Image (cartoon, rainbow, N blue to C red):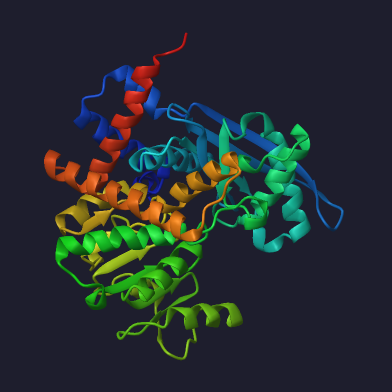
Amino acid sequence: MLVESPSLEKEFNPWLSAEARFDEAANRLGLDEGLRKVLNMPAREITVHIPVQLDDGRIEVFTGYRVQHSIARGPAKGGIRFAPDVTLDEIRALAAWMTWKCAVVNIPFGGGKGGVICEPSILSNAELEKITRRYTAEILDFIGPERDVPAPDVNTNEQTMAWIMDTYSMHVRHTVTAVVTGKPLNLGGSRGRVEATGRGCMIVTQQALKQFRLDPSDTRVVVQGFGNVGSMAAKLMARAGFKIVAVIEWDGAVYNPHGLDIPALINHRQETGSITGFREAEDIDRRDAMFLECDVLLPAARENVITSENADRIRCKILCEGANGPTTYVADSILQDKKIFVIPDILANAGGVTVSYFEWVQDRQGFFWNEQLVNGRLEEIMVNSFRDIVEYADKHGVNNRIAAYMVALDRVAFAIKLRGIYA
């Protein structure tokens, strides 16, 4: 069995990557040591152990986490993921990224993240509901519309959010729709939320094309990951005229140099359970597909897919990070040397949290917007945020990622300075 070297283990630790980028941005901003300590450390880390009686009568105990990185600018905000490889370091990093992401798009949230160590594919719907409700009950005192607002993430969805909302509401004895976002429409969800992260990726990519004077019809896109973010981004980009030449999933990849029919591919995956075997495309090796020559590469799956081991083989003009942390810190310099235009994750995939903010606002008002209004306001925020980051990068002579971190750190630090340190 291949064992990763200690250096690779360090590179693949998402918390260390987040910390390294934080340090570089903080150094460039000249933040004092005290503020750096406040900004770098999570405000609260919660570990819970969740006893659940499984369908066969056995009792199993699952471990769950909720990390609230910052509440300086508003309630903590961030998803909950169910996966066997969830770690506290991963949740810490994701919570920090949420703080910076919310600050980059200038919405009044801090950063949070949650996770439960489990394998959803071998659990029944009833078992998942039990895990969700008990996890919610264990963190009940720490969440709420003014405290911490969870959302869906890997292997969780609007049904999961409905269970969380109901559990919280039963405990406080009245219905509280604003305790989570990403809910079903009938329970206070927002129109446009399902497509929001993918739509945000499309909007910032359209802005990046202007840097290269590229037309969408001449733009070849490779999408890695075909879950909600990847499939929605591909669908919306294809509709806008982009040529999606390849899609990569965990079990294979498909390629068509003339462009894939994305709605047909989505239907094929729903019918067969896989993107492979699609009649209008060629099956290719998923490992090689990442290195196809293209104009836009959109990683939309998990962390650490672009690393020091493969970054030199990436052949795109624009890297739009639809996933959280798809590029390791060590790979950043390689991409910079290759002059790849990176749209960093804390900007590229912020469409989801932006429309989550809209959902939270609508729930609190009890007044709901139509989809045209949601999409229009999302576009306005994403376009303005993209311009802020690119202009900041040019002004300060840094790459887009460090510019995004600098803008985010500066905004959060300013809030902390205004509030002062309570003692």
Could you tell me residue 313's position as x and y percent? Answer: 24, 66
Along the line of sight, the residue nearer the viewer: 158 or 346: 158
Residue 3 to residue 296: above or below: above
Residue drawn at x 42%, y 58% is 375
Whether residue 11 is visible:
yes
In the rendered view, does 31 fall on the left or right side of 152?
Answer: left
In the rendered view, does 90 fall on the left or right side of 331?
Answer: right
Residue drawn at x 62%, y 48% is 117
Could you say which quadrant of the image residue 223 lies in? bottom left
Residue 336 to residue 15: above or below: below
**Residue lying at the far right of the rendered structure:** 57
Could you tell me residue 288's position as x and y percent? Answer: 34, 74
- Count of marks placed on residues: 0
Residue drawn at x 29%, y 62% is 205
Could you say which quadrant of the image residue 232 lies in? bottom left
Residue 280 to residue 327: above or below: below
**Residue lying at the far top of the rendered structure:** 423
Along the line of sight, the residue nearer the viewer: 27 or 106: 106
Could you tell me residue 173's position as x and y percent? Answer: 78, 34
Could you tell me residue 111's position as x and y percent? Answer: 46, 37
Residue drawn at x 47%, y 79% is 263
Could you say which quadrant of the image residue 96 lies in? top left
Whether residue 302 is visible:
no
